[in-house]
């Protein structure tokens, strides 16, 4: 209520514009990047299997907003795709806390959002590099639990020297973008498992692992 009283409708409009930028960007990234990674991993068959089984982990992550809670469906998807068990049992748990592409994108959005709210110029190579470094750091400190982004948001506010009132502003934005961020994070773990399989098992790994449907 205090924030609305101070910033008024401008803040609500800024949140709306941020959503109009972030969600389409994430969808575009998933449409373009995920099939490319799957093709690099396993050719046309890799793209076909990824497309068939990636939806369940993606929707689970979107609904739960937790990469850890998505692990069972991720493991089932990897098994169905043909990723070796010894690969996905290592990659997926590590990816749940380390692979944060959606969170890095959202961190860039949060930083530029705060620059705009406080009428600061978001320009210059040093500012861009700082934003990239802080985004990666803030993504790595996220936990697998819902709402873990609050720690990353505190890091953004403190490292950029924003005033204390910036935290509730960016925290609200964090809650709005978290479902899609987690969706990219967790679904990307499955793609990462495929890429690791390509490196570890060779280019014919997907042909040597028969598709097996696992229901959970």
Image: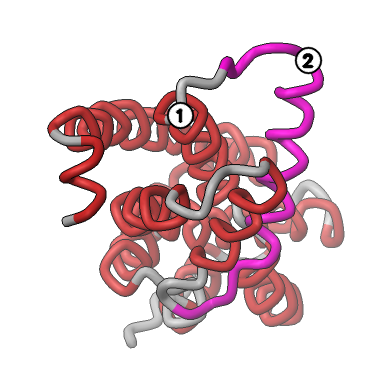
Spot occupied by residue 123 in the image (x, y as percentages of width and height): 65, 13
What residue sits 71% from the left and 48% below the top?
159
Spot occupied by residue 26 in the image (x, y as percentages of width and height): 41, 37
Overall secondary structure of the magenta stretch?
helix
Q: Is residue 93 visible?
A: yes
What residue sits 23% from the left and 41% below the top?
6
Q: Is residue 49 visible?
A: no
Disc 2 element: helix
Near-viewer residue (36 or 168): 168
Q: How is the image coloured?
A: secondary structure
Which of the labelled discs sits on residue 118, or is there none?
Answer: 1
Q: Is residue 140 magenta?
A: yes
In this picture, residue 117 sits left or right of residue 86: left
Q: Give the residue pinned by disc 2.
A: 125
Near-viewer residue (164 or 173): 164
Near-viewer residue (161 or 19): 161
Up-down: is 145 above or below 27?
below
Quadrant housing the N terminus: bottom left
> Which residue range is magenta in the image?
121-145
Using the numbered discs, state the Cα–Cα distance from disc 2 to disc 1 in whole angstroms.
20 Å
| Quadrant of the rendered image containing residue 10 | top left
Up-down: is 34 above or below 141?
above
Spot occupied by residue 56 in the image (x, y as percentages of width and height): 32, 65
What residue sits 56% from the left and 61% below the top?
190
Up-down: is 209 above or below 135?
below
**Which sits earlier in the primary sequence, circle 2 or circle 1?**
1
């Amino acid at each position: 209520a205090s924030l609305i009283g101070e910033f008024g409708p401008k803040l609500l409009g800024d949140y709306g514009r941020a959503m109009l930028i972030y969600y389409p960007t994430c969808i575009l990234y998933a449409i373009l990047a995920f099939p490319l990674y799957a093709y690099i991993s396993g050719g046309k068959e890799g793209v076909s299997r990824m497309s068939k089984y990636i939806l369940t982990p993606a929707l689970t992550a979107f609904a739960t907003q937790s990469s850890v809670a998505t692990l069972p469906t991720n493991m089932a998807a990897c098994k169905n795709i043909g990723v070796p068990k010894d690969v996905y049992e290592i990659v997926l748990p590590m990816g749940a806390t380390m692979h944060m592409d959606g969170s890095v994108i959202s961190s860039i959005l949060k930083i530029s959002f705060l620059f705009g709210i406080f009428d600061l110029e978001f320009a210059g190579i040093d500012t861009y590099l700082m934003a990239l470094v802080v985004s990666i750091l803030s993504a790595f400190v996220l936990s697998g639990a819902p709402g873990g982004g609050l720690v990353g948001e505190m890091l953004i506010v403190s490292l950029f020297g924003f005033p204390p009132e910036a935290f509730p502003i960016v925290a609200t934005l964090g809650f709005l973008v978290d479902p899609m961020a987690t969706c990219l994070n967790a679904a990307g773990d499955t793609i990462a498992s495929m890429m690791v399989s390509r490196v570890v098992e060779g280019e014919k790994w997907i042909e040597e692992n028969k598709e097996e449907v696992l229901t959970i």
